[in-house]
Amino acid sequence: MNGTDDACFPLLETRSVTRVFGKGNGKVYALRGATLSVGQGRLIALKGRSGSGKTTLLNIMAALDSPTEGTVFYSGRDGSEMTEQQKNEMRKSEIGLIFQSFALVPYMTAYENVEFGLRIAGIPTPERKKLAEQALSFVGLAGRMHHMPSELSGGEQQRTAIARAIAHKPKLILADEPTAELDSRMGKQVMQVFRELIRTEGITIVMSTHDPHIMELVDDVYALEDGQIGSESIKEA
């Protein structure tokens, strides 16, 4: 951190974020002035049809993409003033990413997938084993960590992906349709892991989903339509 009092700011905030792809007559607006404030320790769902801008917004929140207009603030820090190196360092230390497709390396065990993520993040060798084992134990895979992805169920693969995302102890997790490839039972298991992360670690989670049953399990729901954040549903934690 840079010495500012992070408690004075939302963990993450998008202000009038617009993202345009293409030029001239080929312009496509993926986002149109999306504004959202994300507080600490919340489980937030972004809902919307395919093409509504959910993935684009998550990529911008993760500093993987930059808005055409508007600004993203990270605990009060203006993302537009960060260098690419600063964004990379922020992702390594403060943000965990979870993908719909699991994105596991098929020839690595669950443990190796998590440890490899820590290696990329620059975690020193002595710490990597401990952090990887802790993360896999947290998601209930202590006895499966030396299995290949092909030997794991879909739910176990997604929990491995969660372990990889949380092993470096980020403040924020961004998850793109993390339950889309799972049946309802496995999807609920993933949501239980998310809830436990928030309860025990104080992590904040922003996820996209189109599943109404999953939306019943989150704190806040924001609807995206035509690139704009429309109706907002605030639920009890």
Image (cartoon, helix red, strand yellow):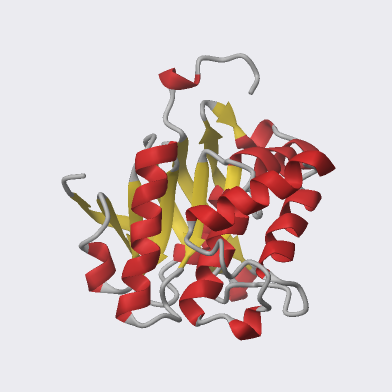
Splitting the image into 4 quarters, where does residue 203 fall?
top left
Q: How far across and how far down the image is residue 129, in percent?
A: 73, 49
Which quarter of the rendered picture does the C terminus lie within?
Answer: top left
Question: Which residue sits at x=53%, y=34%?
Answer: 73
Outermost left residue: 236
State whether residue 217 is above or below residue 9. below
Residue 57 seen in this snapshot: no
Question: Which residue sits at x=29%, y=55%?
Answer: 222
Q: Residue 68 or 177: which is nearer the viewer? A: 177
Splitting the image into 4 quarters, where does residue 198 fall?
top left
State whether residue 51 is above or below residue 195. below
Splitting the image into 4 quarters, where does residue 86 fall?
top right
Q: How far across and how far down the image is residue 231, in percent?
A: 22, 56
Position of 147 with respect to 53 (left or right) is right
Q: Residue 46 or 184: which is nearer the viewer? A: 184
Q: How far across and how far down the image is residue 158, in percent?
A: 52, 70
Question: Which residue sits at x=74%, y=64%?
Answer: 112
Which quarter of the rendered picture does the N terminus lie within?
Answer: top right
Position of 24 with respect to 186 (left or right) is right
Q: How far across and how far down the image is residue 156, in percent?
A: 51, 73
Please give the count of numbered marks on the rendered protein: 0
State whether residue 75 is above or below residue 102. above
Question: Which residue sits at x=41%, y=64%?
Answer: 208
Outermost front residue: 143
Position of 125 with respect to 86 (left or right) is right
Residue 3 seen in this snapshot: yes
